[in-house]
Image (cartoon, coloured by chain):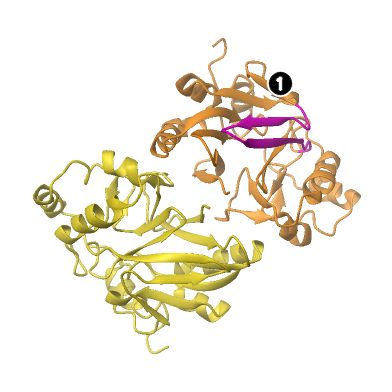
Chain colours: A yellow, B orange
């Protein structure tokens, strides 16, 4: 079982559609505001009914279409409880299991570090890692209650303890890659493989990345599911 | 079973990796020359061994990496017998079944029209349609022995007789879509749904598309698996 992977070239964001093996229900992870028509059309082409819109975190680089998709499809919005997204229908906690379709289960892992509330989702040997673990990299940890130490713990204690053959589907990629595996990232990830916590914290502390252009718009918008304030 | 879908933004070409359910073998369909490093890295990340490089046709808009991947991985190149690609290891004919992994079967369909030799490939309820059938469109039919009448026959007699729920994975998309279904295309494809053959031939005859920029380089290169002439 693989997800359908969709890409927003403007923000290099991956959106994922998970189809139930039996039944017509689906879940979408991290949809992008400007792509809501593409995504509803994609669901229609596949004959799918959206059960949940899932967010891995409150993004700083693009706005979600979660609220819009909820409005259009009747799906429920399910979000990490630590991300301050009050209008969501479901506040997720570590260890929760989200069910859809006839027999589908998505296991919820709290993987803080990129943001304090960030979560990853496990489904049929696939892990959707948001901005916690990227292919041969990881999300930045210098804003939104980010913490390099927490990210190191999330990756080494949660994600890298998943089976090696689990597929890693990240929230972004900037070099045309699509998917990786836990085993490959454990052995080769340029930031995290064979590195101790202190060295990782130093590495992340010295990245000197520019402030995300959209952060002041995107974070408050995403904490309202991408809907206008007051909606 | 879904394929891994990769995208080349320069030519808007999709490349697909098919993983065997059991065993480590894989097949790649329509790889792009400039993406060979991305693709070998992608195979490496998934721990896969390439059994075949498959071409749907001799492309006019980009050059294949089939020869390069064969050289790098030891995979066999399998191509449509009507596409004049003599250095391939396997010349495919309509009805052939290509086997890989422990129990994987790819069924070969001759679907001429975009080019005279074009083929589509069926695997586990997925059909890889190359430039014969695109999402809400189809490939052009005005060069390389293209024929609108033949394309109409290929789509209506071969592709549209597959089960409605079969997933359609096209050779290109220019609007961010990833995948469709036979059922959706039968009902909604803007060029082919609810249209008779004569009307389709007229439509295709009036497209007045510009000549592909790369055609004089790409077609001879692709007829040599993307390798330098004489190699």
Vertically, is B21 above or below B98? below
Vertically, is A47 above or below A220? above
Residue visible at 52% across and 77% down? A75
Residue visible at 27% across and 39% down? A187
Vertically, is A143 above or below A4? below
Q: Is residue A186 magenta?
A: no
Q: What element carries label 1?
A: loop
Residue that extends furthest to the bottom in the rendered view of this protein: A230
Chain holding disc 1: B
- For this rendering, which residue is in front, B51 or B176? B51
Residue that extends furthest to the top in the rendered view of this protein: B230
Q: Name the residue under label 1.
A: B84
State which quarter of the image contains the C terminus of chain B: top right
**What stretch of residues is rendered in magenta?**
B93-113
Pointer 1 local density, CA inside 10 Å: few below 14, some 14–19, many at least 20:
some
Residue visible at 65% across and 55% down? B180
């Amino acid at each position: 079982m693989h997800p359908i992977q969709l890409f927003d070239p403007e923000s290099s964001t991956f959106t994922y559609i998970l189809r139930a093996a039996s039944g017509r229900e689906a879940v979408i992870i991290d949809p992008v505001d400007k792509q809501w028509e593409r995504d509803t059309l994609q669901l229609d082409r596949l004959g799918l009914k959206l059960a949940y819109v899932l967010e891995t975190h409150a993004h700083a680089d693009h706005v979600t279409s979660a609220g819009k998709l909820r409005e259009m499809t009747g799906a429920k919005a399910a979000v990490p409880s630590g991300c301050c997204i009050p209008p969501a229908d479901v506040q997720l906690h570590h260890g929760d299991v989200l069910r859809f379709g006839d027999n589908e289960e998505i296991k919820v892992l709290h993987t803080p570090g990129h943001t304090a509330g960030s979560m990853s989702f496990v489904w049929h040997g696939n892990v959707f890692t948001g901005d916690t673990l990227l292919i041969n990299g990881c999300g930045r940890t210098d804003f939104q209650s980010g913490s390099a130490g927490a990210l190191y713990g999330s990756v080494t204690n949660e994600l890298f303890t998943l089976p090696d053959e689990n597929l890693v589907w990240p929230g972004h990629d900037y070099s045309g890659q699509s998917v990786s595996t836990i085993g490959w990232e454990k052995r080769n990830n340029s930031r995290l493989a064979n590195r101790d916590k202190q060295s990782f914290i130093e590495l992340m502390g010295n990245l000197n990345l520019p402030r995300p252009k959209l952060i002041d718009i995107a974070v408050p918008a995403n904490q309202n599911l991408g809907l206008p304030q007051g909606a």
